[in-house]
Amino acid sequence: MRTSLHNDSDIKEAKQLIRASFKLIRNNLEDSFIQNKSNIIYKKFKNIVNIAKFNSICVYIDFNNEVETKNIIEYAMDNNIKVSVPFLVDDHNMKLKYINDYEKDINRNTRFGNGEPFEHCKDCHIEEVSMFIIPAIAFDEKCNRLGFGKGYYDNILKLNKNALRIGLAYDYQILPSIPKDDNDEILDIIISESKVVTAIF
């Protein structure tokens, strides 16, 4: 257990406290902040990642003031990279579906109000993905992430251990350490407006 907390209930409680406070911060971000920082992160992503090396990537559709991903998605498509995005199956699992057009293939009228591919979009097999671009409530300097607590990305990442895993964050989301349990999957790189954090194994 890579944490100083003593048991599962302590870890769960600590995670919930971080989620609550960081959601409050994120909900109050101004549009100008989101757009400015997202543009900086997009440019850093292009400088760091050689997109031509990847044939199929999975990218989240930004929601509730997350780092924006539209530019990354369209950049990948312009370079003939296949792009899949998450589609929620139930309260703990998701599958991936390919999109060909950011505007036409994303359904905004969903249960949570998040963008998802329409049902008719082609399924993407998880093992086909060579890079995941992943959101979170918070990250730490060892490339751990704290999501919404449903396990969507942890469950997906357990099925594909070979793909590059990139988290996109605002600076304030990167903490020195966050509580972690045995189910949590680690990332390879976190990119924020002024930081690039890489995992040390």
Image (tube, rainbow, N blue to C red):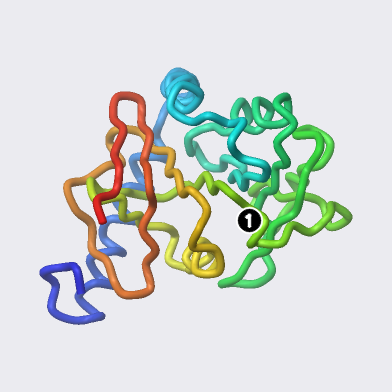
Up the image or down, 153 lies above or below 199; here it is below
| Crowd band around label 1 with a 10 angstrom C-alpha radius: few (<14), some (14–19), many (20+) | few
Up the image or down, 7 lies above or below 159; here it is below
Secondary structure under the numbered disc 1 in the rendered image: loop
**Residue at position x 31%, y 48% from top?**
139
Up the image or down, 125 lies above or below 30; here it is below
**Residue at position x 33%, y 49% from top?**
138
Residue 180 location, x and y as percent? 27, 66
Quarter location, residue 190: top left
The one nearer the camera, 82 or 40, is 82
Residue 32 in view: no
Q: Left or right? Give the position of 83 relative to 4.
A: right
- Please name the amino acid that badge 1 sits on: Phe
**Residue at position x 19%, y 68% from top?**
2
Q: Left or right? Give the position of 24 relative to 129.
A: left
Circle count: 1
Location of mark 1 (residue): 112
Residue 64 location, x and y as percent? 52, 42
Q: Left or right? Give the position of 128 relative to 150.
A: right
